Image: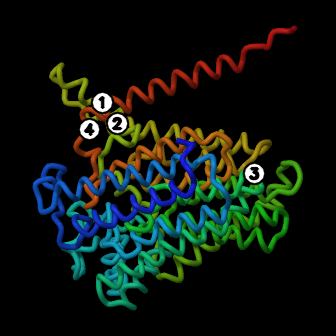
Amino acid sequence: MSGVPHHLARWIGLAGSALLAVAAFLGGALPDSPLRSTPVSIWQGPNGPLVLATWLVGTALLAYAWWALRDTVPSTRWALTTVGLWLLPLLVAPPLASRDVYAYACQGASYVAGINPYEQGVSALPCPWLDTISYIWRDTPAPYGPLFVVLAGAVVKATGSLTGAIVVFRLIAVAGVALTAVSLPVLARRMGIPAGRAIWLALACPLVAVHLVAGAHNDALMVGLLVAGLAVIASRPGRPGPLLAGGALLGLAAAIKVTAAVVVPFAALVAIVGGYSIRALLRHGGWVVGGAVAAVVGVTVAAGLDFGWVSGLASGGDAIAWTSPSTAIGQTVGYLAVPFGGHVDALPVTRGIGVAVLALLLVWLWWRARTREPLWHAAVALAATVALAPIFHPWYWIWPLALLAATARRTGWFTVVALVASFLVLPDGTGLPRFTKTVGAPLMTLLVIALVVWLVRSARVARQPVAAD
């Protein structure tokens, strides 16, 4: 596949993007489309076979072109131009693969009406576009930070219509992608990674075109602010002004989705000039942490909200899918108990174990990062956060993907995850994991077991003394 000519790969990807736009027009996440679709109902619906065919072929072409050039990008400029071409068809298409943008609009409407979205769901107003939102999310509090709630309110107030709001939310997503494109080369240069390769892996990935741009997810702005904050810190270590500004950007990212806060302790290490010491950490890293905390607190207070948005993240666990390893293991335990007459709900236990393992892993990664490259460890920390969380949506993988693209020497493992994740959601937002759980959960459990065995064996080999010559 690496032998594909660059110009041919460019047009193959553009053809895939155009087919995805067709799928969006024919059967995307339209405001009046059914809220409880299944793969069978989509197939039997209007243009069903054509919708699924254009989605499958379009995704396959886009994924093929991205994968084919993952190690042979001609230049940064070529990569940026190609990414821009691939995004064009989806800029004018209806929402694709997610209905979250409608929830954004309703949460913005609630905020404008004086309702605290962290205390009441969008059905409390009720939102004028309530019928466009999935039933499960109508009465749950907003899981997003105060910065995005304020932005959503401003968008709804400025546009006054659902269509106008969707357009502006998509423009905000494009701005986030552009911010990532500007900032990512700074991190790549620090790590000795070709900037073109970093841009290609992070932004030409089908997840970006489908979920960030076509789906208008707020993750685009969060990732843009995150990468920009790290770029400012990495380019000006030891200088209070830039470190404070970089920390503030990280705080703004966390004020969209709190998971961005995972990288702040690692960013404090990036800020240090010279070797690690407690004094150096306080002297340089303190500016980063202070900027991040000030940004989060400042936005929350300015918005007239409270910190209920942090606890609101728990509502994401209402969705159950085997794509989260801890959830898959819990499902598998339940399936194994059925033949013996048992009905076991192991999800609270396995998910709790996953969170506990994550907490320990983050501490261990930070400790290692003191004497190693903290940017790469920050990327791994984000990947672990996504993998060990109770719920995994395909677009979540874009968080670590952006940092891994600029810091990792080996690209196979995280690009494979992105490749598989690109095929997990149908055009109207129907998630395939919901309908494949009896197969997907045991397979994911076996994968986790195999990974643990491999890690244990690798650790044992690493401890063995090297034989003298």
Q: Secondary structure at mark 1?
A: helix
**What amino acid does circle 1 point to?**
Thr
According to the picture, the residue beneath numbered tag 2 turns out to be: 328
Which one is earlier in the sequence, the residue at label 4 or at label 3?
A: 3
User: What is the C-alpha distance between the residues marked 2 and 1?
Assistant: 6 Å
Q: Are marks 2 and 1 in contact (CB under 8 Å)?
A: yes
**What amino acid does circle 2 point to?**
Ala
**What amino acid does circle 3 point to?**
Met
According to the picture, the residue beneath numbered tag 3 turns out to be: 191
Q: Is residue 209 above or below residue 405?
A: below
Q: Are marks 4 and 1 in contact (CB under 8 Å)?
A: no
Q: Which residue is rendered at x = 41% and y = 37% of the image?
A: 325
**Looking at the image, which is closer to me, 423 or 224?**
423
According to the picture, the residue beneath numbered tag 1 turns out to be: 332
According to the picture, the residue beneath numbered tag 4 turns out to be: 437
Depth check, mark 3 against mark 1: the one in front is 3
